[in-house]
Image: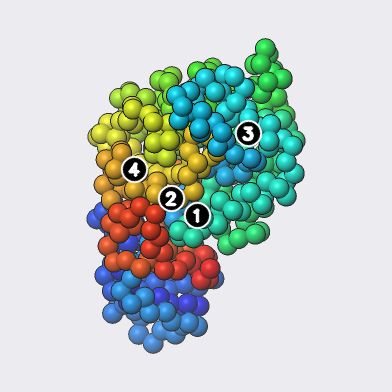
Amino acid sequence: MHFDRLWRGGRLATLAPGREELGLVENGALGCVDGKISWVGNSDDLPPGYSAGQEIDLEGRLVTPGLIDCHTHLVFAGDRADEFEMRLRGETYETIAESGGGILSTVRNTRVATQAELTTGALDRLDRLIAEGVTTVEVKSGYGLTLDDELKMLRAARGLERERSVSIVTSLLAAHTVPPEYRDNRSAYVDLICEDILPAAAAEGLADAVDAFCETSAFTPAEVRRVFEAARAHRLPLRLHADQRSAGGGAALAAEFGALSADHLERTDAAGARAMAAVGTVAVLLPGAYYALRDKDLPPIGLFREAGVGLAVATDCNPGSSPLTSLLTAMNLAVILFDLTVDEALAGVTREAARAVGRFDSIGSLEVGKACDLAVWDATRPVELVYWMGRNPLHSRVFQGVPA
Ligand code: DI6
Ligand code: FE
């Protein structure tokens, strides 16, 4: 048996389903051919007479699948530091949004930015994720809210793959908020999404999924339904920002449409959790937004566990509610604030995150046939990834079989 590259002598957290918890393999070896994993197991069981183009001694280090940030708004222009200060002085996310700030303030900046400017800004944030062993990032539109500006955002997101060794998964989030020019004619904006923006994004292959913000300050369940029907007609998978600031039955709506994920979920009830479990909709937990908005209502983690809902963890990196560019910090926040276990937090940025972006067939665990995306840590125990705040124990990173 020949490997392009072989890593041996490490502690592998394979995250392979069916194995106990993290699927740890001690003294593990992992072989790669053509960018894909071709062999995983104990180093002592390597096939006799194997050969390898390069052999790398892991020296006992922990190896995990490359991390996946499955919910970000990485592409945007400007920042909202002034609004952050307003919130520190007691204003709320909602009152700022009602007075034309919030998401709309980022929309104004993003509309006047060129695609190249958006790329430059996104790369700064992407590099911080990559430095922590992230190999796949989901990126949403939603700060353009016109046909041209939504496509510009998605093209900038897609283009990041050409700039760095990373996989990008895109979501069209034209249903993020109603733009000012449609304030008195909301249904015409939903028409624009369904009849123009979504078909154009689909035709250009720019959207891997369609997302929406189901919220009293954004879109009603009836409006989200229309967007979801249109997405279905284009065979695009669905995601939903659900029950973040108000309980609107968002989790149940996502489940009704068989969405890949429902995200945020601070105000989801037991019926919503059960509906998600029944169809395998993953709960994407975003503790950065919970923390930065000083939320007090916790997502119902116990209900999700009881019902058997998969739990993913992401940064929600955005200039407003979650100015967070560290997935390791999101893991720390998830265990401290949301009571996740260390194993759940690690599964949440690998296996469950892969499910949330609809790619568990190709990433998210160390299994034969999957992309050889690895994070090698200067650590031996998974808890070390979650325990430090602001210390990055990444030793090295491998993207599609190549150290990068
Ligand atoms: N929920 C969020 O947390 C972000 N979008 C969303 O739908 C917030 C985006 C922003 O404030 O700019
Ligand atoms: Fe979000």
- Report the residue at 35% width, 43% height from top: 333
Residue 372: tell me if it is visible.
no
Separation (CA) of disc 1 from disc 2: 7 Å
Which quadrant is home to the N terminus?
Answer: bottom left
Separation (CA) of disc 3 from disc 2: 23 Å
- Report the residue at 75% width, 44% height from top: 114
Question: In the image, what residue type sits under mark 3?
Answer: Thr
The residue singled out by tag 4 in the image is: 334
Q: Tell whether circle 3 marks a residue whose Cβ is less than 8 angstroms from ligand 1.
A: yes
Question: In the image, what residue type sits under mark 1?
Answer: Leu
Residue 14: tell me if it is visible.
yes
The percent coordinates of residue 56 (x first, y second) are 42, 79
Q: Secondary structure at mark 2?
A: helix
Whichever of labels 4 and 3 marks the residue nearer the N terminus, that label is: 3
On residue 327, which mark appears?
2
Whichever of labels 3 and 2 marks the residue nearer the N terminus, that label is: 3
Local packing at callout 4 (Cα closer than 10 Å; few below 14, some 14-19, many 20+) is many
Q: Are marks 1 and 4 in contact (CB under 8 Å)?
A: no
The residue singled out by tag 3 in the image is: 106
- Foreground of the two, 342 or 193: 342
The percent coordinates of residue 331 (x first, y second) are 36, 48
In front: label 3 or label 2: 3
The residue singled out by tag 1 in the image is: 129
Whichever of labels 4 and 2 marks the residue nearer the N terminus, that label is: 2
- Report the residue at 61% width, 44% height from top: 75
Question: In the image, what residue type sits under mark 2?
Answer: Leu
Separation (CA) of disc 3 from disc 1: 22 Å
Q: Is residue 374 above or below residue 349?
A: below
Question: In the image, what residue type sits under mark 4?
Answer: Ala
